[in-house]
Structure formats: structure tokens, C-alpha cells
């Protein structure tokens, strides 16, 4: 458990320009900032002890006033089937979050969290059951990637905000972290391979479009019939489907980018022929692809469909000229699959939104 780090400057919160200002403010020459940035992002240094380009005195000065790590790994769980690995991190204030590495052929996806818990209370999602505890800082988002990179079998090919939380309700920090991860002088992670996934916060989608941020967008549609969507995703009460559609249209027109629609399939809830027709209709006017996710069932009220029904749904949507893929279930038995991330946060009760 860390306590003293809270008082120190957390350098992972700093952009490269801010790092220059910071080193200046403590009386270190500007050009040293480049050495620090490389040490942090190329060498993945946990502190400055081994940054031998700096004098001993300077290293001590930095170690005394700054920190590069605020999170402690408390548990690693690995799937014996597919190597999917889930990490449980203890944050400096004692709360916990999870992140996951998914290996799939040549792809290595880092699935990261943007908040501790989530307020949006989607009925099929474990994180929703936690409620919202707090937003993560840019540094805490970046640190998940650095810590996983040290432990991964391969470097990441994709980074997705599909862990805990609703990234568009923590947009500024998510964007700052994404710019840091893609800084050409640092990790230089390809911008298009960072995907921000939203449950459909229409105002956030517009803000994202206006920000000209070069990252990719995924929208968790999950139902294209208003009544059904409201039942499983209360966020649809605040942002109904027509408003969501207008915001996506705005995004597509403003950015010229394609959007990914995620569609969780829950047996008997959103997987009928009518649901498929409405999905095709909703996505009709966008350049997009559809990613079907068989529900990782948390309880019998939200059961997974049979594989043959998933195939039928996928084929039906495909026949209507939509690009569609089915997401493999990865890490199911270790609760690392989509929607299964839930950290016990010392029995703290998170807040949930009420849109009614
Ligand atoms: N809050 C964001 C990102 C985190 S959730 C969002 O909702 O998009 C990441 C993805 O996991 C979403 O597409 C969500 O629909 C999906 N998901 C949540 N619970 C699930 C479950 N039980 N089974 C399968 N997918 C689930
Ligand atoms: Fe939050 Fe996304 Fe889970 Fe919904 S699916 S509760 S928005 S994390």
C-alpha cells in the first residue's frame, strides 16, 4: 500500500511540454526533459535510479520530488485456454481497477480502464454493478499500459478503452492519456489503434468529433429498438437512439472515419429477426463495421445465445451488406471477458446514475 507517493509529482500525468516546464521549475536544464521522457517511455523506468545519463545528485532530486509509479499489482490471473491475462491494480488511494491483455493471432490487445467502476448501470455488465467511484487520471491510464507492457508476451498492437468505466465521461483525461501513449518521442503507439468505446454518450461523441482527436471510436449499440435498449442500458433514456444516431452522423461527417458498432447478443432480449433488421437499419447510413459479442452471462436473466443462433444472426446481418464479425470469447473462465471486470473496492458503494 502506497502512501508517500501521493505527495510527489506524478510525472505520467505530464505531456512532453509539461515535463519541460516541470524540469525547468525545479532548476534542471530543458534538454534533460528529453532524457527523462525517453527513460520513462522507452526504458519503462519505474524510477530514476538507473537513468545513468543523469548525475547522482539529479537522480536523487527527481526521486525525492516525483514518482513514476502509483499502482501496485495485487493479482494476476491467466487463462489456461488462451493466455488472456487479467491484472488487478491497487491505486494510491486504496481503490482497485483491472486491465486485461488479450492475445489473438498476431494481435495483442491491451484493454484498459478509464474509471473506477461505472455509473451507467447497464444491466448485463459487471462493472455497472460496482457503480462509479472516481475518474482515473491520465497517468493512471498510461501506467496501466506501461505496467502491462513490462509483463506482456508481445508489445501491444491495439489499445482499447473497453475495461472499466465510460471513457466519454472522463474524456479530457482519456484524450490526454491517448496523446501521451501516441507521442512520437515516447511509446509512439499508432493513434488509429487506440479505440475509445462508448455506451452512447451523444454529447461526448460530438465533443470527440470537435476535438479532432485521431483515435478510433466504437459505440456499444447493443439494441436498436428504443424500448429494448432502455431496458438493458439506462443511458438510452438520456440519449435516445435518434439523438445517438445524429451524434454519430456528426462524428462521421466531421472526421471522415468509420465507426465500429458493438452489439452484445443476449438470448431472448435483443437477438430476434426484428432486432437484426433494426440493427441493419440503424447502421445503414454509416461507414461502419459491426462487432457481435455473445453475452458473457452474469446471471440467468441475461443468458448467452447458442452458437448456432449467433451464427444465424451474424449471417442474416451479413446478407444485408453489413460488415460483421463475431468477437471470440476470451478469458471467460477468469472473468476477464467483456463486461466481467469487477473489483471489490473494500465494500465501497459506488454511485449510479438515475435518468428516470
Ligand atoms: N463503457 C464503455 C466501455 C467499457 S464496456 C462501453 O460501454 O462501451 C466494453 C464493452 O463490453 C461494451 O461494448 C459492452 O457492451 C461490453 N459488455 C459489457 N458487459 C458485457 C457482457 N456481460 N458480455 C459481453 N459484453 C459485455
Ligand atoms: Fe459502464 Fe460500459 Fe459497463 Fe455500461 S457496459 S455499465 S457503460 S462499463
Image (tube, rainbow, N blue to C red):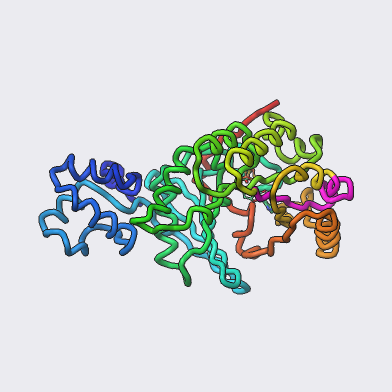
Foreground of the two, 123 or 157 = 157
Residue 35, image x, y percentages: 23, 57
Residue nearest the viewer, comparing 268 with 226: 226
Asked if the stretch drawn in magenta spans residue 267, the answer is yes
Q: Give residue 98's position: percent from left, percent from top.
A: 51, 54
Highlighted magenta segment, given as a residue range? 259-277
Location of the C terminus (image quadrant): top right
Residue shown at the point (81%, 35%) measured from the top left: 227
Quarter holding residue 38: bottom left
Decide if residue 229 is in sight here.
yes
Query: Residue 322 is drawn in which quadrant?
Result: bottom right
Q: Is residue 8 above or below residue 59?
A: above
State whether residue 111 is above or below residue 79.
above
Image spot of residue 166 (x, y percent): 57, 42
Please name whichever residue, 63 or 14, is drawn nearer the observer in this view of the structure: 14
Where in the image, quadrant-wise, is ligand 2 located? top right
Q: Residue 314 at x, y = what percent?
A: 80, 59
The answer to if 269 sits in the magenta stretch is yes
Judge whether residue 234 can be spotted in this image.
Answer: no
Amino acid at each position: 500500500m502506497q502512501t508517500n507517493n501521493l505527495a510527489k509529482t506524478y510525472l505520467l500525468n505530464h505531456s512532453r511540454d509539461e515535463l519541460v516546464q516541470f524540469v525547468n521549475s525545479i532548476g534542471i536544464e530543458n534538454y534533460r526533459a528529453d532524457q527523462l521522457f525517453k527513460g520513462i517511455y522507452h526504458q519503462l523506468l519505474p524510477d530514476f535510479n538507473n537513468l545513468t545519463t543523469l548525475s547522482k545528485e539529479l537522480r536523487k532530486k527527481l526521486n525525492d520530488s516525483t514518482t513514476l509509479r502509483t499502482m501496485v499489482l495485487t493479482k494476476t490471473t491467466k487463462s489456461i485456454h488462451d493466455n488472456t491475462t487479467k491484472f488487478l491494480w491497487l491505486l494510491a488511494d486504496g481503490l482497485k481497477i483491472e486491465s486485461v491483455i488479450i492475445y489473438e493471432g498476431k494481435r495483442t490487445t491491451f484493454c484498459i480502464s478509464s474509471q473506477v467502476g461505472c455509473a451507467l448501470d447497464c444491466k448485463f455488465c459487471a462493472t455497472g454493478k460496482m457503480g462509479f467511484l472516481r475518474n482515473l487520471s491520465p497517468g493512471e491510464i498510461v501506467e496501466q499500459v506501461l505496467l502491462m507492457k513490462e509483463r506482456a508476451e508481445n508489445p501491444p498492437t491495439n489499445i482499447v478503452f473497453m475495461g472499466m468505466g465510460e471513457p466519454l465521461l472522463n474524456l479530457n483525461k482519456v484524450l490526454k492519456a491517448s496523446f501521451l501513449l501516441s507521442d512520437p518521442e515516447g511509446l509512439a503507439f499508432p493513434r488509429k489503434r487506440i479505440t475509445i468505446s462508448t455506451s452512447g454518450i451523444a454529447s461526448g461523441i460530438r465533443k470527440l468529433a470537435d476535438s479532432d482527436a485521431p483515435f478510433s471510436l466504437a459505440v456499444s449499440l447493443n439494441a436498436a429498438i428504443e424500448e429494448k435498449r432502455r431496458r438493458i442500458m439506462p443511458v438510452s433514456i438520456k440519449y435516445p437512439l435518434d439523438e445517438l444516431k445524429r451524434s454519430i452522423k456528426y462524428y462521421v461527417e466531421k472526421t471522415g472515419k468509420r465507426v465500429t458498432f458493438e452489439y452484445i447478443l443476449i438470448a431472448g432480449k435483443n437477438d430476434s429477426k426484428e432486432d437484426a433488421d433494426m440493427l441493419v437499419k440503424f447502421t445503414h447510413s454509416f461507414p461502419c463495421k459491426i462487432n457481435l459479442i455473445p453475452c458473457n452471462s452474469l446471471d440467468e436473466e441475461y443468458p448467452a445465445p447458442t452458437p448456432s443462433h449467433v451464427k444465424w444472426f451474424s449471417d442474416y446481418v451479413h446478407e444485408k451488406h453489413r460488415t460483421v464479425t463475431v468477437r471470440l470469447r476470451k478469458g471467460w473462465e477468469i472473468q476477464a471477458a467483456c463486461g466481467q471486470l469487477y473489483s471489490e473496492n473494500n465494500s465501497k458503494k459506488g454511485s449510479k446514475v438515475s435518468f428516470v
